[in-house]
Amino acid sequence: MMLPQLGLKGSRDIEQINDRLQYHPTTYEFYTDTSDFTQDGYKKLFDAVQYVQSQGVENIVIHHPMAYGQFHTELIAPENKFPQLYRFIETSTEQLVRLSSDLNIQCLVHGSYANETQFFIHQYSSVEDAQKACFNRLDRFKKMGGNHIMFENSISPIFSYGEPSLEDEIIDHHYRLAFDTSHCFIYVHGNNEKLIASLNHLKPSIVHYHLVDSYGQQHDSLPLGTGKIDWSAVLPVLNQTATSIYEINLKNNDDCREQLQSHHYLMNLAQ
């Protein structure tokens, strides 16, 4: 079993970047919001990526913005009813793919979120139709992004891990996957056996992990070892060629302490 790599997350804010860089992470994942997709913001994001690269960080992932206006960036939001949201998702994904291709890094897009999923599902005649719309859009983004784009699971029924039949469909699309352990754990209602089964089933398709603990009931983003995930069972089944970060809620965004604590927890477990 290989030792876990140190992967940290932060914004393009220089204080956050320098806080993370002092620990020499193998992977840095950028959190973004709508401000990163203005002309000025995009240039600053581009410069921030180059700065992190210049400091010897091998792997860089940019997380697609989670929200636009009052809504999450939900892929199934229909264009005819939510034209601005739809268009923002399109243009921001195009920008991320271009940046990722130019600088040889990765971008991450959520297949779905959970907060307004039911609201958006109701714009369709069935869950199946909504899911089909999601897959159609992901197929297009996959073609656009090639080896620079990956898709992350949610706890919504539209794009989640933990249900073997849906996982089979996801595998059939040959997506490059980001696996958030807490989202899967919540989706399977805190069942460690189902989490491990999902990690194993999707393993060949996984290129990136969000390592996060959870009680398995709601979105809680806990440091590793403080929730109910069985990390001693998770560690041996991780895809060793994939990158990973600790996506933990921080008390202070300029101090990645909780992410580091999670790494130390995993390192002790591995040894």
Image (cartoon, helix red, strand yellow):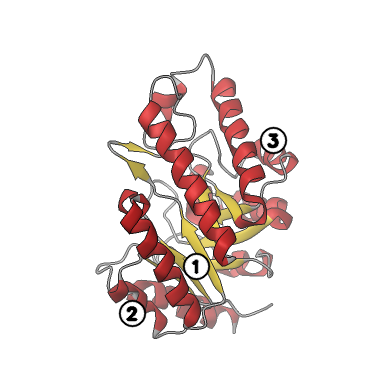
The total of numbered circles placed on residues is 3
Give the residue at the far top of this rendering: 125
What secondary structure is marked by label 3? helix
Q: From what the image shows, is residue 134 above or below residue 126? A: below
Earlier in the chain: of badge 3 and badge 1, it is 3
Specify few, some or many for label 2: CA neighbours under 10 Å numbering under 14, 14-19, or 20 or more: some
Please tell me which residue is depicted at 25% across the width and 67% down the height of the picture. Answer: 251
Q: Position of residue 132 (x, y in %)?
A: 61, 26
Disc 1 residue type (three-letter) = Ile
Q: Are marks 1 and 2 in contact (CB under 8 Å)?
A: no
Please tell me which residue is depicted at 66% across the width and 79% down the height of the picture. Answer: 2
The quadrant of the image that shows the C terminus is bottom right
Q: Is 205 or 233 nearer to us in this picture?
A: 205
Q: Position of residue 121 (x, y in %)?
A: 46, 24
Per the image, the residue denoted by label 1 is 245
Q: From what the image shows, is residue 236 above or below residue 110? A: below
Q: From what the image shows, is residue 15 above or below residue 68? A: below
Disc 2 residue type (three-letter) = Asp
Q: Position of residue 174 (x, y in %)?
A: 72, 45
Q: From what the image shows, is residue 26 above or below residue 247? A: below
Q: Distance from label 2 to label 3 (Cα)?
A: 42 Å
Earlier in the chain: of badge 2 and badge 3, it is 2
Per the image, the residue denoted by label 2 is 19
On residue 191, which mark appears? none
Q: Is residue 143 left or right of residue 228?
A: right
Q: Is residue 115 left or right of residue 205?
A: left
Per the image, the residue denoted by label 3 is 165
Q: Is 219 or 225 nearer to us in this picture?
A: 219
Q: Position of residue 230 (x, y in %)?
A: 54, 63
